[in-house]
């Protein structure tokens, strides 16, 4: 392996390109026409255009990525997260083209991509799964199987959750509260699953209300599997994580040991090779169950890197290059605490609507123990074609409370102007009593009840009016200016 092509964009492309260069590899970036001036392009030794702005025609197009690899003589491809990262045919085609796929084997991606097969594989290895059915291929089969299980297993009871076998990430799930609602929900779930995943197969599990979401970071080389502890990812909205931490503040040492062992067992069951994540839900009575396995590097991997000092991308590359994991579990120690927040261009007061557009000014403070993963330098435009994340901010400190304070101060000193972001929302979370205590679950952010209603003073209202006025003036006057001129305008107020 000499030259690595990164089939992705944004902060994760930059993250991967930097480690690849650090390791002495030549690097290739790919970009869409929309990403002509995107930063990740300039982090690589060379870059190549792979099509128009729409992901379907560029970052998701297997053929274009393989062509780019051929043209640039790259001999390995890192898929990052999202896009083609969990597409098993892509991984297979990369291999067929004679290139190295920096990730797990294509058949493991495929197996874990089928949520019923994944359940069965880990169940065999003794990992607890939520009481539920196997694959249900028709409405009749589903009704019979559910009614049977309701009679024969006393831990299988309402409420139930219908899930798509081809799903994951929460798409196409339906809660069923009573037997009367069963048929209709199975039919709905099937038609949603057909539309979203081209696969009508569903399965049914008991529905756990308000669970916590804990995920185990694993590293495997096809022979041994090690864990890098767990991440607490319960603070999410509509299946988008908002804040993540390592380790979880809500596990007893005994429960943690069991979950970590289950994570390793799940990965071992499929002879996992590369970095991966095993997801669990934990009930309010501390029962835990396997949900699914993500066969990719994840957005929130920095918090695991912070507490272990291990570079996950470096290991992904080494493992793909045939290097065995020379570490043993005892070599991996967790130290201190890490919190990550995702800074987004979105309007938290109006349905979390994405806010693509002109980012006039963005400045992060320089700090100890804080890492910023970002692909934007202001002034710039946040594209409407892709995810509107501005940056991931992750902090480390010896204790959780020090880490929370550090993140708070860092965010407060972060200057971002020109479009609406979730910065204030993130600070509300960091300041909330539930967060201070570390007591929260996956449904908490879904209801707005936890948010304090603050009545601003007249002075603050006046300041906001002035800010609005100045911002409108800036965007009006800067419309026809080049970017260096816009920058000086952004600095003016
Ligand atoms: C569940 C569940 C409760 N009970 N399964 C959501 C995404 C997909 N990976 C599975 N998900 C869930 N499965 C049972 N049997 C609750 C969720 C769930 C969830 C899980 C993890 C993190 C956030 C979540 C938000 C809503 C629902």
Image (spheres, rainbow, N blue to C red):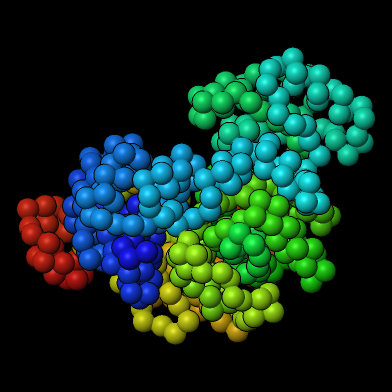
Q: Nearer the viewer, residue 413 or 155?
A: 155
Q: Tell me what residue is drawn at x 53 percent, y 50 percent.
A: 105
Give the residue at x 51% y 26%: 198
* Residue at left offset 78%, top offset 43%: 130
Rendered view: 475 above or below 329: above
- Residue 123 as seen in the image, left or right of residue 366: right
Give percent across and percent down for residue 246: 61, 69
Decide if residue 364 is in sight here: no
Percent across and percent down for residue 215 are 64, 58
Looking at the image, the residue that sits furthest to the top is 140
Picture quadrant where residue 451 is located: bottom right
Viewer can see residue 255:
yes
Q: How many marks?
A: 0
Residue 50: image location, x then y, percent: 24, 45
Whether residue 306 sits left or right of residue 6 in the image: it is: right
- Locate the C terminus and report the quarter of the image it occupies: bottom left
346 relative to 303 in the view: left or right: left
Between residues 427 and 259, which one lies in front from this camera angle?
259
Q: State whether residue 379 is above or below residue 145.
A: below
Q: Residue at x 46, y 39 (%)?
A: 89
Figure quadrant of residue 287: bottom right
Q: Quadrant of the N terminus?
A: bottom left
Q: Position of residue 419 (x, y in %)?
A: 30, 55
């Amino acid at each position: 392996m000499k030259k690595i092509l990164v089939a992705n964009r944004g902060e994760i492309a930059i993250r991967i390109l930097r480690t690849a260069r650090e390791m002495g590899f030549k690097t290739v970036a790919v970009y869409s026409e929309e990403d002509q001036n995107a930063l990740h392009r300039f982090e690589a030794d060379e870059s190549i255009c792979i099509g128009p702005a729409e992901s379907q025609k560029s970052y998701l197009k297997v053929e274009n990525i393989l062509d780019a690899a051929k043209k640039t003589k790259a001999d390995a491809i890192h898929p990052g997260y999202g896009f083609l990262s969990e597409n098993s045919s892509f991984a297979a085609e990369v291999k067929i083209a004679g290139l190295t796929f920096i990730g797990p084997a294509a058949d493991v991606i495929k197996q874990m991509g089928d949520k019923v097969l994944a359940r069965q594989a880990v169940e065999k290895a003794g990992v607890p799964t939520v009481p539920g059915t196997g694959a249900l291929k028709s409405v009749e089969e589903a009704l019979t199987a559910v009614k049977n299980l309701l009679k024969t297993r006393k831990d299988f009871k309402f409420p139930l959750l219908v899930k798509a076998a081809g799903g994951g990430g929460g798409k196409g799930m339906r809660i069923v509260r009573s037997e009367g609602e069963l048929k209709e929900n199975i039919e709905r779930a099937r038609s949603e699953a057909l539309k979203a995943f081209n696969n009508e197969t569903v399965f049914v599990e008991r529905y756990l209300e308000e669970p916590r979401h804990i995920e185990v970071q694993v590293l495997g080389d096809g022979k041994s599997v090690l864990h890098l502890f767990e991440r607490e990812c319960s603070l999410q909205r509509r299946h988008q994580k908002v804040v993540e931490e390592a380790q979880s503040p809500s596990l007893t040492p005994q429960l943690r040991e069991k979950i970590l062992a289950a994570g390793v067992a799940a990965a071992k069951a499929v002879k996992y090779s590369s970095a991966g994540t095993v997801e669990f839900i934990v009930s309010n009575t501390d029962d835990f169950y396997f949900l699914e396995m993500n066969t990719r590097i994840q957005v929130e991997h920095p918090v695991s890197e912070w507490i272990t000092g291990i570079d996950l991308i470096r290991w992904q590359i080494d493992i793909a290059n045939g290097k065995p994991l020379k570490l043993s579990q005892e070599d991996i120690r967790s130290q201190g605490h890490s919190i990550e927040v995702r800074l987004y261009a979105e309007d938290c007061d109006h349905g979390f609507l994405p806010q693509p557009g002109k980012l006039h000014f963005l400045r992060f403070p320089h700090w100890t123990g804080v890492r910023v993963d970002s692909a934007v330098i202001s002034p710039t435009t946040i594209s409407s074609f892709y995810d509107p994340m501005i940056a991931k901010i992750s902090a480390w400190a010896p204790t959780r409370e020090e880490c929370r304070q550090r993140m708070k101060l860092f965010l407060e000193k972060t200057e971002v102007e020109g479009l609406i972001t979730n910065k204030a929302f993130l600070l509300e979370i960091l300041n909330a009593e539930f967060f201070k205590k570390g007591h929260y679950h996956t449904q908490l952010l879904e209801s707005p009840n936890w948010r304090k209603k603050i009545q601003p003073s007249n002075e603050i209202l006046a300041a906001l009016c002035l800010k609005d006025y100045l911002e409108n003036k800036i965007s009006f006057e800067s419309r026809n200016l080049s970017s260096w001129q816009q920058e000086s305008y952004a600095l003016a107020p």
